Amino acid sequence: MKIVIRNTAHEAAQQVADLIAGHLTAKPDIVMGLATGETMRPVYTHLRTLFEAGDVPSSAFTSFNLDEFSGVPPTHPGSFNAYMMEALFTHIADAEGRCFLPDGMADDPQMAAAAYEAKIAHYGGIDLQLLGIGRNGHIGFNEPGTPFDSRTAAVELSQQTRDVMTGFDSNRPHRAITMGIGTIMEARHCLLLATGEAKAAAVGAMLSHPPSLACPASALQAHTDLMIVLDRQAAGRLTEHQLLEVETC
Ligand code: F6R
């Protein structure tokens, strides 16, 4: 595990975009796992700038997003589909055939989740998984209590997650399809970004020993290639002991 702490959220996001760019340059046809959320918006902004400058190849990667709300049409501004279209997919060539999200409108969400999992396997698995973290420690929409070996599934969202949801006036979705923790753990590289004071407690819990189902992100302690990028605020509640471990990891 490697942890990098940058002064500001802007710098942390830029670093994550640069790391993604490095992977794309080394292997343009990489399979990426993508995340949405407010934390990731500046990452995609930086990435778009690199693509537009022609510095980084953008035409050969495949991507699988972590999650999508159930019962929310892809055209709804609150959907992760709409988010990704705006943030990235309309800025690259042929996204439709190679950039995938779970089908939030599926009649049978469990079947759609299993199909998504199979599709990831068909593409050879995820090379680089981008992750944010929820205030309650969720990764993807794997809420506290989710078994660490969970696979892509239709899940219920916690009230805490629904309370901070953006993009919906009312009628916030109750359910989503998310890659499982076990699915995420199989990615060859994981890159987690957390910024802001609101994430400090979750980041502390993620790195507390031993890993606990109460903090889904703590499963990542067992990942063999994990990079965590934080700003000073998100790192604010790491104990001296945790920071010491960071340096030796
Ligand atoms: C999004 C996702 C979530 C978010 C998390 C943080 O695809 O899987 O785990 O990363 O909820 O969201 P923000 O960045 O909005 O605080």
Image (cartoon, rainbow, N blue to C red):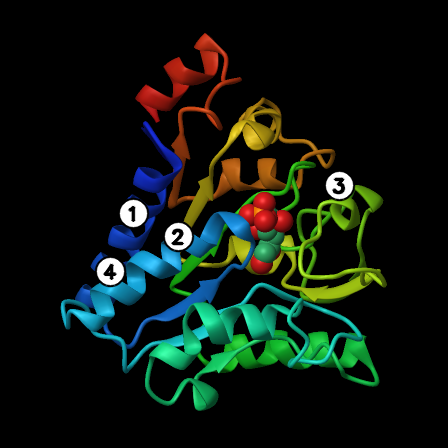
Quadrant showing the N terminus: top left
Give whichever of discs 2 and 1 has the lower sequence position.
1
Q: In the structure shown, which secondary structural element does the residue marked by tag 2 occupy?
A: helix
Q: Are marks 2 and 4 in contact (CB under 8 Å)?
A: no
Give whichever of discs 1 and 4 has the lower sequence position.
1
Residue 144 is tagged as 3
- Mark 3: amino acid: Pro
Look at 44% across and 43% down and name the residue there: 193
Give the residue pinned by disc 1: 14
Give the residue pinned by disc 2: 42
Q: Are marks 2 and 1 in contact (CB under 8 Å)?
A: yes
Question: Where does the image place residue 194, in percent across and percent down from the top left?
Answer: 48, 38
Look at 67% across and 55% down and name the residue there: 166
- Mark 1: amino acid: Gln
| Residue 224 in view (yes/no) | yes
Give whichever of discs 3 and 4 has the lower sequence position.
4
Look at 41% across and 33% down and name the residue there: 230
Q: CA distance from mark 2 to mark 4?
A: 14 Å
In the image, which is nearer the foreground, mark 2 or mark 3? 2
83 vs 30, left or right, is right
Give whichever of discs 1 and 3 has the lower sequence position.
1
Which of the two residues, 46 or 112, is positioned nearer the viewer here? 46
